[in-house]
Image: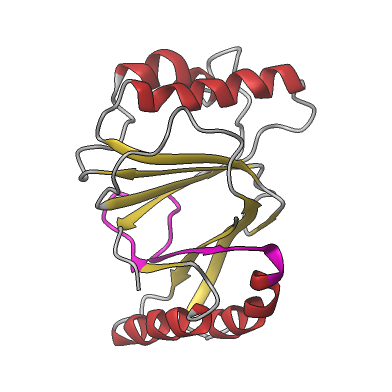
Amino acid sequence: MFDVVRLVHLSAAGGSGAEQLMTELRAAAAGVARRVLVQPTLPGVRNGGDVLVHLRFDEAVDWSGCAPRVDAVLADPLVTHVDGAEYDGGVGRFAEPRSPGSVYLVLLLRVAPGTAPATVDRFEADLLRMPGYIPTMRSWQLSRVIRGIGSVPWTHVWEQEFTDLDGPYLMHPVHWAHVDRWFDPECPDVIVHDRICHSFCANELA
């Protein structure tokens, strides 16, 4: 599988134009993508944009044929900024995915250049530890980025589906005890220094 995420920031004058933009994005991927999720983001995102786009294709070549249409839609003057990533799905999974969740969440991040591969492996293992402790996380995928666009050159995409908005994990003990250290500038283990994009939306497919 080949996945694409776009976090679309809109001007303050978005209004009804946002609905039209989402309709055009869905149409641009229809019939090509296996999964087409294009939804407004929910309150509480961090650098997450106003519209979240997640597309899944059987092969990278399928995205190559679809990308010009998506890019043409995103060239609309209503769009002020786009962060995004393209990646082969999955460094690994903790276990087989459970049933689908109602909320889709995605985190774009950049591991600092020069980080030792063994350290990156431990970081990834800590992220993949989380589903074993958080039953509201219904499915998940951690991937290394092939091509990133936007604010920084992203290295990883961490995706989950949750049962509801109470599911996100930031206050869960497994996060602050094992995962936060990789992001905390006051911790010697920190490897994520740049801005991150933390975005989520209703998991309603086109």
Q: At which x and y percent is residue 134?
A: 29, 26
Q: At which x and y percent is residue 87?
A: 64, 52
Looking at the picture, does residue 205 appear above or below residue 166?
Answer: below
Name the quarter where the C terminus is drawn: bottom left
Residue 52: within the magenta? yes
Q: At which x and y percent is residue 152?
A: 66, 50
Q: Residue at the spot x=45%, y=21% of the render?
A: 129
Looking at the picture, does residue 119 appear above or below residue 78?
Answer: above
- Nearer the observer, 124 or 84: 124
**Apparent side of residue 16 relative to residue 154 in the rendered image (left or right):** left
- Nearer the observer, 58 or 121: 58
Looking at the picture, does residue 67 appear above or below residue 8?
Answer: below
Looking at the picture, does residue 134 appear above or below residue 165?
Answer: above
Q: Residue at the spot x=59%, y=48% of the render?
A: 89
What's drawn in magenta, residue-wise? 39-61
- The answer to whether residue 45 shows anywhere in this view is no
Q: Residue at the spot x=37%, y=87% of the render?
A: 20
Q: In which quarter of the image is residue 194?
A: top right
Name the quarter where the N terminus is drawn: bottom right
Q: Residue at the spot x=22%, y=45% of the render?
A: 165
- Nearer the observer, 65 or 176: 65
Q: At which x and y percent is residue 110?
A: 63, 39
